[in-house]
Image: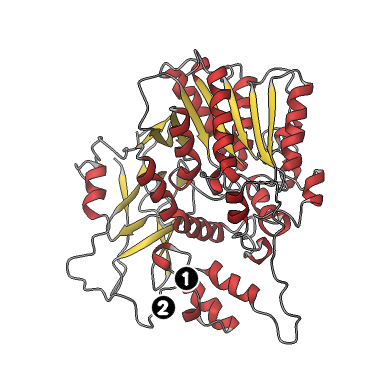
Amino acid sequence: MAEPIVMPSFGMYTAEGILVGWLQPSGARVTAGDPILLIETEKATQEVVAPADGILHQAARIGERLTEQEVVGFILADGEVPPLFEGELVAATGQPFATRRAATRGQPAAEKVLPERPPGGVIATPAARKLARTANIDLTQLTGSGPGGRIVEADVEAAIHRAAAPGAAPARRWSPLIPATISPEAQAFLATFPEPAAKPPSPAADDIAGWARAHAGNEGEVRQLNADIEARYKPQLVQTHWGGVPVLDIRPQSWSESRQILVYVHGGGYVLHSAASSLISSVPVADDTGLRVCAVDYTCAPAAGYREIVSQIANVVTALRAAGHDWADIALFGDSAGAAIACAAILKLRDEGLGLPAAAVLWSPWADIAEIGDSYATLRDADLVFRYEQHLKSAALAYAPATEHRHPWVSPVYADYRAGFPPTLIQGGTKEIFLSNCVRLYQALDTAGQTAKLDLYEGMPHVFQAFNPDLPESKLARQKMKAFLNRYLSGGH
């Protein structure tokens, strides 16, 4: 019988907490008392332990706001089918799970009266407060990037980085080179990019809690942006599962019944983002192409390694096949790390003799996970988004150990494509360190006799299509993507 995992009591002044990280992946065998997730409130970060021995089933996502006694998951017996989000009765409660969660979502316990702000007037996480005290940073001068404007540890780290040490030379003024050869809209937009080197460094590869906090902070930062996209495009969004993997089923307003489907693998350096926080990539594509998009909510590293993540994508595709979608109806689309994962999943499907999808579209693929390739060096200081050593290196190690960085599932530039690969469109910009990744992956496909198109955009940064979908360059890229998919999906679209 499924044993529910419930949120603990938070105490006075606190009605809800944020799930900042799962400490064990879904499907892991746990023992009663094992720490399984982290909850962060205004007062503290606390662990929630397994209530029983069994198999962990996660039923809440990182970044969600959760109330006391809300069900966030289950401990299952061997062979027990996990309750779903919608429609299925929860054996432990006799209530539909979706109904139970909806009934408690965002509702404080009746006896609690909460102040508008906690004592002290600043909304900040405990870790942020501790770091600020140590570094003598005034929290009242910071703008929080966490959910609800909460100041998180990364905000304090950024403030520390900006503060000049006594006697140090004044910080160099950031002034990115904006080419005159791009659209006026793009020129204005790129001028707003902050200096990448001023961003706080990523957590260590094995810092599970650190990555969980980074993930939660990132989800909070982009929540409003994605809400705006949803309000503007008005897609139908349904959370469901394919092949046992959570997905977000996206159907644009213009969608008409069709077997064609685009499987989307989100980026985020293997460690960040989710299907719900990547709508700025997936929804405009769905709207422009008219295609149904299946956005995969794979388990991010380091909670899962590359083999598990790649297998999750492959499982979604095989489930779609089992549901009646022909290979000619299925295309894969990914951006950045998601593009590399999509490549790897296609290689896995091919090598297991299952078949190949009709097409693949890759935006700025992280095709060589190591810092190998000309543009890693030549564009190091021109990239507007990140610095490899500071932001990507530990993410790469969280995804795969250094000894496996040339495995084709980790770095698709090293794959043997002679055995087959679907027609592939690779899009990228000339102002990103992944430019060589785009070129090298294209050459690997082309020299192996596969159909590939390299579509580069002057002066554009990493995954520019997602940073601002309204740029003329972004619109052009999506139109070329639509034409490419129309050509290779069954019967066009």
Residue 91, image quadrant: top left
Q: Nearer the viewer, residue 167 or 57?
A: 167
Q: CA distance from mark 2 to mark 1?
A: 8 Å
- Identify the secondary structure beneath mark 2: loop
Residue at image position (71%, 17%) is 419
Q: Position of residue 148 (x, y in %)?
A: 39, 65
Q: Is residue 109 left or right of residue 426?
A: left
From this view, report whether residue 342 is shown above or below residue 138: above
Residue at image position (53%, 59%) is 214
**In the image as oriented, which residue stretches furthest toward the top?**
491
- Identify the secondary structure beneath mark 1: loop
Q: Earlier in the sequence, mark 2 or mark 1?
A: 2
Q: Nearer the viewer, residue 310 or 152?
A: 152
| Residue that numbered label 1 is attached to | 151
Res. 308 in view? no
| Residue that numbered label 2 is attached to | 122
Disc assigned to residue 200: none
Q: Position of residue 28 (x, y in %)?
A: 48, 43
Under mark 1, the amino acid is Ile
